[in-house]
Image: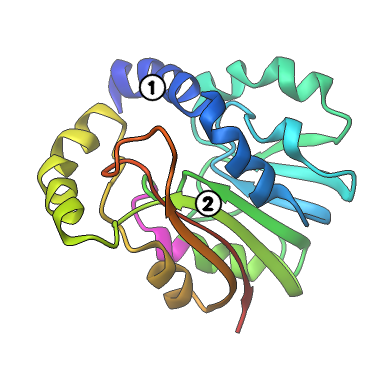
């Protein structure tokens, strides 16, 4: 990705995604995680404070060395063992049927092939394992969608390939999951083009 993508973007994301207005969504999406968890797009570990006591361990999938470095204070202070276990969500170096839960937060917008990544998540989840997700994507309102399509090329350049206009629920379903809980809303305090969120859980079909 070059210097900007490798060194600057992870710091921008750490700042932008670390804003307090995202905490309620992190708390909600982490609720109900159990056992061994695989987290796709671990970033700088911003979800760590919200892991419930029912989590036994976390396998962190994170491509950016800078993000992993920024996470170290949080990782070291976490009561939950966390191990960096892979670099690419599209190809997980993990066994089939290994994990009880999976977590993805503001990640599917950036992965080049999100359906492949979600199929990998489904592969490594145990039967009955649940995917927890909160993601921004295509808004429900056409006037907001028009702005998202206009802004998307600039968003991709500035934020390491982030897309504003992906249809998150459709991606989850295409990968072989059934969405069993879903809340779609605009995040308070965020521009609508950036803050159209889908928060929910899904199980493999």
For this rendering, which residue is in front, 63 or 77?
77
**Among numbered discs 1 and 2, the one appearing first in the sequence:** 1
Q: Which mark is residue 6?
A: 1
Mark 1 neighbour class, 10 Å CA radius: few under 14, some 14 to 19, many 20 or more: some
Real-space Cα separation, disc 1 to disc 2, in angstroms: 24 Å
Which secondary structure, mark 1? Answer: helix
Across and down, in percent, residue 128 comes to 75, 76
Tag 2 residue:
134
Q: Quadrant of residue 180?
A: bottom right
Whether residue 113 appears in magenta in the rendering, the answer is yes
Colour scheme of the picture = rainbow
Please provide percent x and percent y for residue 146: 12, 53
What secondary structure is found at the residue carrying circle 2?
A: strand
Quadrant in which residue 194 is drawn: top left
**Residue at the image point whose x is 60% and y is 62% from the top:** 121
Q: CB of mark 1 within 8 Å of CB of mark 2?
A: no
The magenta stretch spans which residues?
111-116
Q: Residue at x 24, y 27 (%)?
A: 158
Q: Nearer the viewer, residue 111 or 148?
A: 148
From this view, report whether residue 91 is shown above or below residue 193.
below
Tell me what residue is drawn at x 86 percent, y 36 percent: 80
View extreme (front): residue: 188
**Image position of 38 with respect to 45: above or below:** below
Residue 180 in sight here: yes
Residue 103 relative to residue 129: left or right: left
């Amino acid at each position: 990705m070059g210097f900007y993508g490798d060194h600057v973007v992870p710091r921008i994301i750490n700042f932008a995604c670390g804003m307090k207005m995202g905490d309620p969504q992190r708390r909600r999406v982490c609720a109900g995680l159990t056992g061994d968890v695989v987290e796709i797009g671990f970033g700088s570990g911003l979800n760590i404070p919200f892991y419930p006591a029912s989590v036994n361990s976390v396998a962190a999938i994170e491509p950016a060395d800078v993000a992993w470095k920024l996470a170290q204070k949080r990782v070291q202070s976490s009561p939950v063992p966390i191990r960096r276990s892979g670099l690419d969500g599209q190809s997980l170096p993990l066994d089939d049927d290994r994990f009880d839960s999976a977590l993805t937060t503001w990640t599917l917008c950036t992965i080049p092939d999100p359906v492949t990544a979600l199929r990998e998540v489904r592969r490594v989840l145990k039967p009955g394992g649940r995917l927890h997700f909160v993601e921004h994507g295509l808004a429900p309102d056409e006037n907001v969608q028009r702005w998202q399509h206009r802004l998307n090329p600039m968003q991709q350049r500035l934020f390491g390939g982030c897309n504003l206009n992906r249809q998150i629920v459709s991606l989850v379903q295409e990968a072989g999951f059934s969405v069993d809980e879903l809340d779609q809303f605009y995040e308070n305090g965020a521009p609508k083009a950036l803050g159209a969120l889908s928060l929910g859980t899904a199980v493999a079909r």
